[in-house]
Image (cartoon, rainbow, N blue to C red):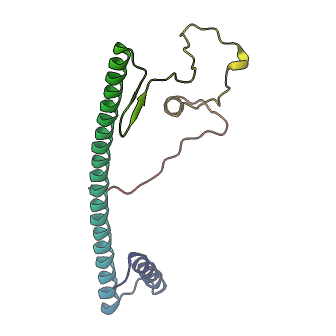
Amino acid sequence: MSNLYELSGKYARMLFELEDNQGEVTQEFYDEFMATDDAIEEKVENCAKALRNLEGEKIAIANEVKRLSDKKKRYENKIQSLKTYVQGQMEFVGKDSVKGEVLSVRIQNNPPSLEIEEDAKIPEEYLVEQEPKIDRKSLLKMMKESDEYIEGVSIKQTRSLRIF
């Protein structure tokens, strides 16, 4: 059995052959043409079924990723909560370290970090330059609604396969 690419090529060749014969069709040619057309439609439908299966698997994987991500977040919260609890109790009783048989626990200073208030006036030398970002949605809306021309920008209409 042929693949869709081969069937499409055969279909195109048959159309050229039909054109060369000035539209004259024999029963044999007609039967082969219709069989090729039916085979193409069957292949396209089978490809659509395969796409549906892949899309379903993609959704299942996305759901599993979300489930595991949520579970990971719960574990992170439990870890942080337990750390905060232990640290609070150690500080309450005045212990900076506990040496156990298997594990040791210490409270120590973290590296210094900055706390910047919203209205802080940071000197220019400490600001990092960033590339300007294009607001594509607003630009597309403006170009659709007006006759304004911007050099190097155009609206393009693409096509894609939809399965219903």
Q: Is residue 56 above or below residue 111?
A: below
Q: Is residue 137 above or below residue 117?
A: below
Q: Quadrant of residue 89?
A: top left
Residue for point 34% across, 55% down: 162
Q: Nearer the viewer, residue 24 or 143?
A: 143
- In which quadrant of the rendered image does the N terminus lie? bottom left
Q: Position of residue 52 (x, y in %)?
A: 28, 60
Residue for point 73% across, 18% down: 125
Q: Nearer the viewer, residue 30 or 103?
A: 103
- In which quadrant of the rendered image does the C terminus lie? bottom left
Which residue is the extreme one toward the right? 125
Q: Quadrant of residue 121?
A: top right
Q: Position of residue 61 (x, y in %)?
A: 30, 52
Q: Position of residue 151 (x, y in %)?
A: 67, 36
Q: Nearer the viewer, residue 102 or 149?
A: 102
Residue for point 52% across, 23% down: 110
